[in-house]
Amino acid sequence: MNKKYILSSLVIITFITYAFYQQITGTDNSVAIKKSANTIPTAPVAQQALPVADKPKTTTTGGQYKDGTYTSSVTNAYYGNVQVEAIISGGKISDVQFLQYPQDRSRSAQISSHAMPILISEAIQAQSANVNTVSGATDLSGAFTQSLQSALDQAKNS
Amino acid sequence: MGMTITIEIADQKVGEDTFEKIYSYFQYIDNTFSVFKETSEISRINRGEIEKKDYSSDMKEIFKLSEQTKYDTNGYFDIQTPSGTYNPSGLVKGWAIYNASKILLADGFQNFYVDAGGDIQTHGLNTEGKPWSIGIRNPFHPETEIIKVLSLGNNEGVATSGNYIRGQHIYNPLTKENQLQDIVSVTIIAANVYEADRFATAVFAMGREGIHFIEKQKGLEGYAIDAKGIATMTSGFTMYVKK
């Protein structure tokens, strides 16, 4: 058995011991709530969590979480950032507050309907004519090059 | 069709016969599909002189592709006119240019473009070994100005549909506001000019909705200019814009 195996065995044993300890004591597992808060990506998921808040447990025994207020990291939900705060009371989630959520309602509505995505617009502007050929709706490619050249010639001579 | 055909081949060893071959191919296309020629097959079909089963194989293919395009564009593309005749011009040009590029490829050429009336199939690189640079015509000054330069180095096709004459009406102060909102020019970049042309035609018919339709299509990018000179582009369009 080489060094690597010994090391990984130690890591695994440590985890098992820690998990066992957690199960017995029923204490400090704030990592779990933080993680679940982090993965709330959109409002619908958060809504699923809300009913939990409606019936908070007041018992202090057997709770999964340590009492306190936990703030998630900011999650990008594509149409805006989502950040929630979970309040743990009696070892259970007693409330979930949105600290950040997409507030640009019209934009969110547009994206969710997939009807009119936001596209960039600009005022058209004349460009240098140094091109191989030109795409256009009418048959003016030859005329274009010629007339442009004549315009350039005039510009030179004027 | 009354349009200029320009072919530039950047490969060495290109003879006059190559150009002749391509031009005569376009001549054949015109003789078959031009609704302006009384003797063309399409005109004879429109006069009821040819039964469906007797259509040429190319004509059958164009009818098949037209059906497909009508489906792909939610009915916005339709070769059947209100009077019941057929006008496949909105699709034939891109199809023919793409076929011409295949002829050049089969003859061993790798670096060229084929431009027919402003719709273009590129292949390979230009004489400087760089991507082909393609201007987009200013719909308000079509003979003198370009308003964008595209850089196409991956065998893309590009097509523009538009109505420049209508575009010039914006200077009429009596024009109604909703007409001012009209799209006057739509340029589409696609994997080949056939795709670009058929979608450019349909998208132009869609008006302002068109560019949003293109945004949803995989492999298509577009640049739509309205009557006020405001252009709206799809999210991937700038990838092709020469800096």
Image (spheres, rainbow, N blue to C red):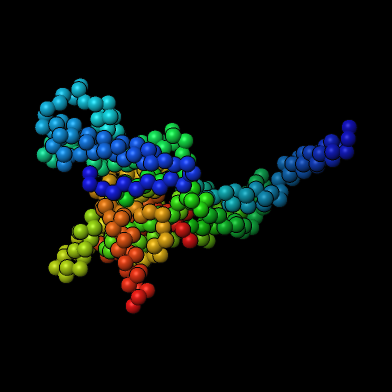
Residue name at image x 39 percent, y 35 percent: B103
Farthest-out residue, front: B16
Farthest-out residue, top: B53
Q: Which percent across, then down, holds residue B151?
A: 45, 54
- Quick one: A105 or B89, which is closer to the camera? B89
Residue name at image x 37 percent, y 74 percent: A156
Position above or below: B57 against A88: above
Q: Is residue B230 visible to the viewer in this orientation of the structure?
A: no
Rendering quarter of residue B28: top left
Position above or below: A156 against A12: below
- Quick one: A71 or B23, which is closer to the camera? B23
Residue name at image x 62 percent, y 49 percent: A35
Rendering quarter of residue A23: top right
A37 left or right, relative to B56: right
Q: Is residue A144 visible to the viewer in this orientation of the structure?
A: yes
- Quick one: B240 or B43, which is closer to the camera? B43
Q: Which percent across, then down, holds residue B115?
A: 35, 47
A93 left or right, relative to B154: right
Residue name at image x 44 percent, y 41 percent: B14
Rendering quarter of residue B93: top left
A155 left or right, relative to A17: left
Farthest-out residue, bottom: A158
- Quick one: B82 or A128, which is closer to the camera? A128
Give the quarter of the figure containing the N terminus of chain B: top left
Position above or below: B230 against B111: below
Circle count:
0
Q: Which percent across, then down, holds residue B111?
A: 47, 44
